[in-house]
Amino acid sequence: MAIRVNLDMILLEKKMSLTELAERVGITLANLSILKTGKARAMRFTTLEALCRELECQPADLLIYEPDEDEAE
C-alpha cells in the first residue's frame, strides 16, 4: 500500500508507549499495533482525529504517501 503510518517516529519523539497511546485514544492495543505495523487497510477519521489530538500533530505527520514501485512507472 502506498500510504504508510508514521507512528513509530512520533511515539519516539513524544516519548510515549503504544500502550499509553492506546489508553489515551480509547482503542485497543491490538488495533493500534495493526496501524503501527502497516497492516491496516483503513482508518476512521475519528481515530485519526484522536491520534492527532493525543500526539499533538497534524494528519500529514502521521500519514506518508510513498508510491509503490508498480505505480511509479
Image (spheres, rainbow, N blue to C red):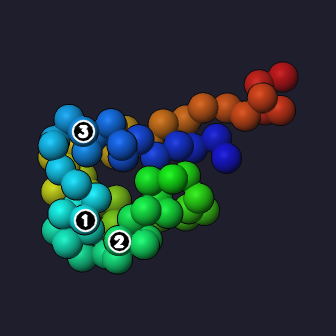
Q: Are dots 2 and 1 in contact, CB under 8 Å?
A: yes
Identity of the amino acid at label 1?
Answer: Thr
Q: Calculate the distance from the C-alpha at mark 1 to the C-alpha at mark 3.
A: 13 Å
What residue lies at 78% left-to-right and 29% top-to-bottom?
69
Identity of the amino acid at label 2?
Answer: Leu
Q: Which residue is mark 3?
A: 12
Q: Residues within 10 Å of mark 1 (few under 14, many from 20)?
A: some
Label 3 residue SS? helix
What residue lies at 16% left-to-right and 57% top-to-bottom?
54
Q: Which residue is mark 2?
A: 29
**Horizontal placement of 14 versus 7: left or right?**
left
Q: Which residue is mark 1?
A: 19
What residue lies at 46% left-to-right and 46% top-to-bottom?
5
Q: Earlier in the sequence, mark 2 or mark 3?
A: 3
Q: Earlier in the sequence, mark 2 or mark 1?
A: 1
Q: Are dots 1 and 3 in contact, CB under 8 Å?
A: no
Q: Residues within 10 Å of mark 3 (few under 14, many from 20)?
A: few
Q: Earlier in the sequence, mark 1 or mark 3?
A: 3
**Horizontal placement of 52 versus 45: left or right?**
left
